[in-house]
Each structure stands twice: as structure tokens, then as C-alpha cells.
Image (cartoon, grey):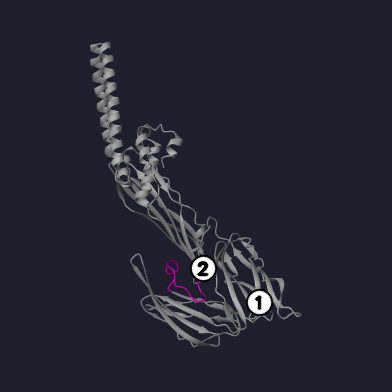
């Protein structure tokens, strides 16, 4: 399990794209005597922070600064942060602060800090969330804190999390142990996504602990004492999303291709990418159906994380498209409930035109060849009819024998080229002209396309391919024979 530490981690790209200033704390629930660190961040060339000497009547213990740069797709993002550490003795609200960035003023959101008295007993289990009211699909952070008095010996600890009924839950991190006053403190964090509207109760977490106590009758031996302790429960008010919307947050949508002009039979690789903040795992796979275009797609790749109190990441899905003539990739859309604007937003990509060369010319050539062959056949019929039945039989036999010879010679030529192909790319060029001759050839071409253009790991048995190329071109290969090939 990952441990990110108790202070701040660096900003991730999906967070930086959506704010100019930000305020966050390392913890918003503390025991009396613990310190809190407030972080004010600004993105821009020049930032002017407010002068803060106290928060809620409690003096600032220390102030520090940091600067960083992140480059994303050629654009440089510059960040400046200030850290203010203070020790509140009771509940306090950090007010909204005004930060001037590149001549414009921006305000941060207030943050509430809850201060609790240290427990009088040896053990304590507490549960709290960063939000009490959310929308369906809106992430909220749940923290469970275990406190143990210093000097209490435990031989065994077993944690029982809540059932999380009505939520999709993801465990984030277990923080390292820290000493606060006379207690050893450890935290477990989750990100929760409510799946239905209404008031949902998060039931209690519990710990099964076995402590060691010195035997009153024998100072050199210990007795084991087992007990179960419980946390509090929580109630979350979940509001519904507008009809037709399942996503909550703030996202961007892009569709890109690796090339806009290809040869007939060559693959165009399309990537659809969603980035942002929210329930990224709930994004549905995109569908694509274009007439006269063969479409292959990979499983979507989802990368998610929880940074600085925000959950988000990226969703990407790749398609390979093969066609013989020009086609257009249609627009894709993504609907979500914008967390800032509090309204339904629909993002759309622009259609992408793909130019395919060679497909039309090949079809015309085949058409002319067929027409010429039909004319030749008609002439031959006239000649043969005039010569007689015997000569017709002889000539037909001769033609059939020649056709078989030419076919064998063609197959033999393809077999030699397959054997001499240096790599998958060269083999792909050999087989592409026959991609629509049979399903077997099409599947082999797809495997080679994946290897050449997408780093796939398909293995093509060339010996079996050479042996069965005649069957492939006829489209008569049995299913079990083909499955052994790849």
C-alpha cells in the first residue's frame, strides 16, 4: 500500500488545469495540540499573496515558500506556493483569502478545522469526511483515525472498514504513524462515490485489538485482553444529477489521429482522451461505426489519483481504422455535471476527414480488367463456335491447365515473399492487398498492424502461413486451423 506522507504532495496535471489559486490543508481534523499547515497556491507569472500573521486568533508559527514548473504539451505552467503553520486550540474556520495573479484578483475558499480533545481512554477510533453534502458521483474523502496511548502494548490489531453501502469506495493510503501528545496516531483514507440520491449512512468502522497487560500475580508474565472498539457513523446528503448525466466533475475531451492521409488498407490510429477531475472510472467506452471501414479498438486505459483533496485523472481509448476509400471520423461527445458551474455540460470533438489514396484506382483497374476479359471471352466463343466442338474441348482444356499453372505460380511467388519478409512490417505490406479476400487474412493483417503501429505482442507462425496461404486466399481454412496460426 502506498504512503504519501502527512504533508503535501506535488500537484498533478489534471488539477492544475482547472484553477488559478487554491487553498488546502494537510489535515482538517486534529487533536488539541496538533499543528495545521495551510497551503496557498497560485498559477501564473507573478503572484502577490496576502500578509497573514494569525488565523482565527492563533498566531502563525512558521512560513515557507516553494516554486515549481510543469510543462504539458509545450505549455509551461508556473506555480508559487506559501505554507503557513499554526496550532489552533479549538474549532476554527480559515477565511477566504485574495491572491493577485498577473494583475487579476482571485479568492480562495474557506476551510473549516475541527479540533477535538484528546481521548481519556487508551484507544480511540474516529471517522470523518471532508463533505456532508454531495451530488451522485461526486467524490468525497473519508478519513478513519486510530489513536493509542503511548505505552499500551498491542499484540494484534484487525481493522474492519465500514460496508460502504450506497457508495463505490477506493482505499487511498495509510499514513505513517505519528506521535501527537501522549498518543500514537494512524490514519486510513478512502475516496467514496455515492451511487444513489438521498441520505446515505456510512456505518461504523471497528477494530479488534488484543492488548498485553502485566499479570498482577506474576510480574514476569503478561495476560492477553481482547476487545472491539467502534468509530462513529456518518450521514451524507446526496443530491441527484440532471437526467442523462452520470459524471460529476470538470473534464476535457480530445480526439486525435496519427495521420489524415493514408494508402488503402493502411491503418489510421485514433485516440480519444478525457482528462479532468471527478469520477473518471464511470466514463463509458466510446463506440465507433463507420460504413465501409474496418474498426478495431483496445480496452480503455484509466489512470486516477487523489492529490491535494481532488480526485481525477485520465481516460484514453484507442481505435485502428482500415478503409479503401475516403471516410470521416464522426464527432464524439461527453456529458457531465460541472462541479463549478453547477449545470450540465456537453463537450464535443470536431469530425476528422481521412483521405485514402489508391483504393479507388485499384477498383477501377479491376473493373477495366474484368471488362477486357469479358470481351476476350466473347471473341473466343465466336472463334470456338466456328471451329467446332472438338477444338473447343482441346482449347478449354489448355486454358484450364494454364490457369491452374498461373495460380500455382502466383501462390508460389507469395510464399517466397512471405518466407523472405524481414519483419512484421514487410509481411504486412505483402498481405495488405489481400485483406478482403478472407476473414483469416484480415485477422492476420490486424495482428501485424497491432505489432507494427501499437507495439502489440502477436506472433504469426510463418511456416503455417506459407503452407496454408492457398486456403487463406480461398477463404476455406477451418476455424481450428486458423486459431493455431496466431
Q: CA distance from mark 2 to mark 1?
A: 26 Å
Q: Circle 1 — which element?
A: strand
Pointer 1 local density, CA inside 10 Å: few below 14, some 14–19, many at least 20: few
| Magenta part, dominant SS | loop
Residue 483: quadrant of the picture: top left
Q: Position of residue 44 (x, y in %)?
A: 38, 75
Residue 481 is covered by the magenta coloring: no
Residue 14: quadrant of the picture: bottom left
- Which mark sits nearer the N-terminus, 2 or 1? 2
Residue 263: quadrant of the picture: top left
Give the label, 2 or 1, closer to the camera: 1
Q: Position of residue 180 (x, y in %)?
A: 59, 81
The residue that label 1 is drawn on is 153
> Quick one: quadrant of the C terminus?
top left
Which residue is nearer to you in this view: 265 or 213?
213
Pointer 2 local density, CA inside 10 Å: few below 14, some 14–19, many at least 20: few
Q: Circle 2 — which element?
A: loop
Q: Which residues are magenta?
A: 1-20
Q: Position of residue 433 (x, y in %)?
A: 31, 39
Residue 351 visible in rendering: no
Residue 7 is covered by the magenta coloring: yes
Q: Is residue 166 above or below residue 71?
A: above
Q: Left or right: where does residue 11 sit relative to residue 155?
A: left
Q: Position of residue 50 (x, y in %)?
A: 45, 84
The residue that label 2 is drawn on is 2
Amino acid at each position: 500500500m502506498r504512503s504519501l506522507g502527512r504533508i503535501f504532495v506535488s500537484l498533478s496535471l489534471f488539477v492544475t488545469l482547472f484553477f488559478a489559486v487554491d487553498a488546502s490543508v494537510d489535515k482538517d481534523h486534529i487533536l488539541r495540540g496538533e499543528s495545521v499547515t495551510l497551503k496557498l497556491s497560485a498559477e501564473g507569472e507573478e503572484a502577490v499573496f496576502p500578509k497573514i500573521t494569525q488565523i482565527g486568533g492563533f498566531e502563525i508559527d512558521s512560513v515557507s515558500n516553494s516554486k515549481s514548473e510543469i510543462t504539458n504539451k509545450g505549455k509551461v505552467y508556473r506555480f508559487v506556493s506559501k505554507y503557513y503553520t499554526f496550532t489552533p486550540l479549538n474549532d476554527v474556520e480559515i477565511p477566504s483569502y485574495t491572491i493577485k495573479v498577473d494583475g487579476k484578483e482571485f479568492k480562495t475558499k474557506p476551510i473549516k478545522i475541527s479540533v477535538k480533545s484528546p481521548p481519556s481512554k487508551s484507544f480511540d477510533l474516529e471517522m470523518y469526511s471532508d463533505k456532508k453534502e454531495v451530488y451522485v458521483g461526486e467524490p468525497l474523502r473519508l478519513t478513519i483515525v486510530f489513536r493509542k496511548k503511548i505505552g499500551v502494548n498491542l499484540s494484534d490489531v484487525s481493522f474492519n472498514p465500514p460496508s460502504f453501502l450506497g457508495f463505490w469506495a477506493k482505499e487511498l493510503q495509510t499514513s505513517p504513524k505519528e506521535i501527537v501528545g501522549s498518543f500514537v496516531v494512524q490514519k486510513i483514507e478512502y475516496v467514496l462515490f455515492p451511487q444513489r440520491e438521498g441520505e446515505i449512512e456510512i456505518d461504523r468502522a471497528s477494530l479488534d485489538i488484543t492488548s498485553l497487560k502485566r499479570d498482577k500475580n506474576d510480574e514476569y508474565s503478561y495476560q492477553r485482553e481482547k476487545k472491539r472498539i467502534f468509530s462513529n457513523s456518518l450521514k451524507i446528503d446526496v443530491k441527484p444529477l440532471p437526467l442523462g448525466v452520470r459524471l460529476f466533475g470538470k473534464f476535457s475531451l480530445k480526439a486525435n489521429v496519427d495521420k489524415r492521409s493514408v494508402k488503402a488498407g493502411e491503418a489510421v490510429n485514433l485516440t480519444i482522451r478525457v482528462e479532468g477531475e471527478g469520477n473518471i472510472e464511470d466514463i463509458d467506452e466510446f463506440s465507433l461505426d463507420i460504413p465501409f471501414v474496418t474498426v478495431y479498438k483496445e480496452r480503455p486505459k484509466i489512470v486516477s489519483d487523489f492529490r491535494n483533496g481532488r480526485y481525477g485523472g485520465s481516460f484514453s481509448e484507442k481505435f485502428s481504422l482500415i478503409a479503401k476509400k475516403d471516410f470521416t471520423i464522426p464527432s464524439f461527445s461527453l456529458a457531465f455535471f460541472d462541479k463549478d458551474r453547477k449545470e450540465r455540460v456537453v463537450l464535443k470533438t470536431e469530425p476528422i476527414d481521412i483521405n485514402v489514396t489508391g483504393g479507388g484506382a485499384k477498383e477501377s483497374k479491376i473493373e477495366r480488367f474484368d471488362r477486357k476479359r469479358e470481351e476476350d471471352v466473347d471473341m473466343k466463343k465466336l472463334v470456338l463456335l466456328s471451329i467446332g466442338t472438338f477444338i473447343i474441348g482441346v482449347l478449354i482444356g489448355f486454358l484450364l491447365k494454364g490457369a491452374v499453372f498461373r495460380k500455382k505460380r502466383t501462390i508460389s511467388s507469395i510464399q517466397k515473399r512471405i518466407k523472405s519478409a524481414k519483419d512484421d512490417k514487410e509481411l504486412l505490406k505483402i498481405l495488405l492487398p489481400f485483406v478482403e479476400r478472407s476473414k483469416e487474412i484480415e485477422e492476420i493483417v490486424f495482428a501485424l498492424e497491432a505489432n507494427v503501429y501499437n507495439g502489440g505482442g502477436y506472433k504469426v507462425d510463418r511456416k503455417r502461413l506459407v503452407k496454408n496461404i492457398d486456403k487463406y486466399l480461398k477463404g476455406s481454412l477451418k476455424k481450428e486451423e486458423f486459431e493455431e496460426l496466431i
